Amino acid sequence: MIKLFIGAVIGFAVFYLYQNPGDITGLIDTAKATVNSSAQTLVDITKD
């Protein structure tokens, strides 16, 4: 399961850089936004 997740993340990064050559800053911003959104979802789910 973890291998699948890591593979998907790497695949997304490669695809993003293929579509937007040299946009490392955009990739980092997108990754940060995704992590923050996922973390907020987990907080909302586990909140009682």
Image (cartoon, grey):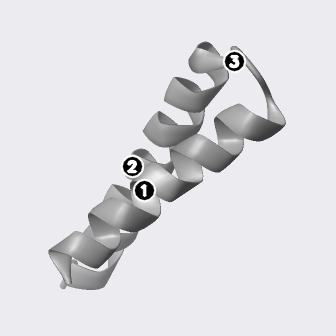
Q: Earlier in the sequence, mark 1 or mark 3?
A: 1
Which picture quadrant has residue 26?
top right
Label 3 residue SS: loop
> Which residue is depicted at the point 22% across and 78% down?
47
In which quadrant is the C terminus drawn?
A: bottom left
Looking at the rendered structure, which numbered label has been put on residue 23? 3
Where residue 14 sits in the image (x, y, percent)?
A: 58, 43
Q: Earlier in the sequence, mark 2 or mark 1?
A: 1
Q: Work out how far the residue at label 1 is from the one at label 3, CA to CA, in angstroms.
A: 16 Å
Label 2 with label 3: CB-CB less than 8 Å: no
- The crowd level at tag 2 (other Cα within 10 Å; few <14, some 14-19, many 20+) is few
Q: Work out how far the residue at label 2 is from the one at label 1, CA to CA, in angstroms.
A: 11 Å
Which mark lies nearer to you, 2 or 1?
1
Q: Quickly name the residue at label 1.
A: 9
Which mark lies nearer to you, 2 or 3?
3
Report the amino acid beneath label 3: Asp
Looking at the rendered structure, which numbered label has been put on residue 35? 2
- The residue closer to the viewer here, 39 or 24, is 24
Task: Say above or below: 45 vs 33.
Answer: below
Where residue 33 sits in the image (x, y, percent)?
A: 52, 41
Which picture quadrant has residue 39?
bottom left
**Visible residue check, residue 37:** no
- The residue closer to the viewer here, 37 or 9, is 9
